Image: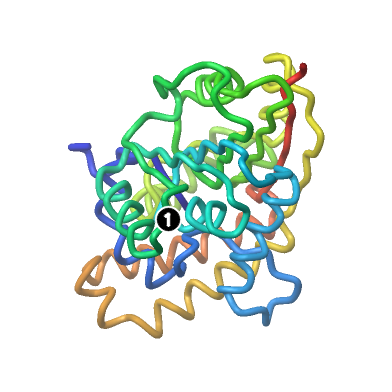
Amino acid sequence: MATDGENSHEPAAHYDRVHSAWRLIMGEEFHYGYFEDPETPLERATAALTEQMIERAGIVAGDRVLDIGCGTGQQACDLAANLDASVLGITTSGSGVAAATRLAAERQLDGARFEQRDGTDNGLGSGRFDVVWVLESSHLMRDRKGLLSESARVLGPGGRLVLCDIIRKREIPFPEVRSRRAEFATLRAAFGDAHMEPLESYASDLRDLGMTVTDCSDISGPTLPTFSAWRSNVATHKPALQGLLDDQGVHDFVRATDILESFWRDETLGYGILAAAKRH
């Protein structure tokens, strides 16, 4: 769940606080998994989700890739190492940049660099990239239109955008929001101040920006077993996690996975992936 501080619910501050704990729970890839079956190991499932992104991005050797909300830097480093891409990872989290830079140095990768920038106002040159990669960070950005417009701006003609994230699958009436406010507070405590939108809203905004949407897929089913896998890792690493999150933090995380799992099952929330290309 890659993210973009004085307030503990602000994305950068929240990410800095939970970074070490999430590595134990979510693994090195730091995001949801794509499970061919519920027994698939989490490491294989998270790698499979990355492969879903790679397939849609069509990355080839020499492509200039912007990874927005780069998390641990794992995907950026893998893209540089395995596909010979030149990758710039950006995040508003200082600890995220430091961790990702260390990882690239450990792997002796010159093709992966990391900078502290805002994905909704990145300050990078127009037309500079061949691919924009947004893996599970957009739900923590309030200015969703800013994210998409900046992504389109930095792509050159024919450039590709690929994005996956948690999505809202139905409108939630205000009385329901009020009755479930304790659940939403738990989600906020565990995962930060998230704002989910329908998958089609992403696609519509990209079309308005002159992009051609080439894929728009709901993959809620294959991502559902992620919650069980995370809970299993919490149980395995509980003593270490209590030192990083404290007892309440661990409890909040487990409770949050239960809530999210119920939202997946009743089709309140889910997971989507889309790809788009900039017209020539």
Q: Quadrant for residue 33, please give it.
A: bottom right
Q: In the rendering, at what x and y percent does residue 19 appear? A: 31, 58
Give the structural element (helix, strand or loop) at label 1: loop
Residue at left 57%, top 36%?
64
Residue at left 74%, top 28%?
277
Q: Amino acid at mark 1?
A: Leu
Task: Give the residue furthest to the right.
Answer: 214
Q: In the rendering, at what x and y percent does residue 236 appear? A: 40, 85
Residue 202 visible, this orientation: yes
Q: Which residue is mark 1?
A: 109
Q: Is residue 171 left or right of residue 147?
A: right
Question: In the rendered view of the protein, which quadrant contains the C terminus?
Answer: top right
Q: Quadrant for residue 24, please give it.
A: bottom left
Q: Quadrant for residue 161, please give it.
A: top right
Along the line of sight, the residue nearer the viewer: 237 or 155: 155
Along the line of sight, the residue nearer the viewer: 57 or 105: 105
Residue 275 versus residue 154 in the image, above or below: below
Q: In the rendering, at what x and y percent does residue 101 appear? A: 32, 52
| Crowding near the residue tagged with mark 1, few <14, some 14–19, many ≥20 C-alpha atoms within 10 Å | some
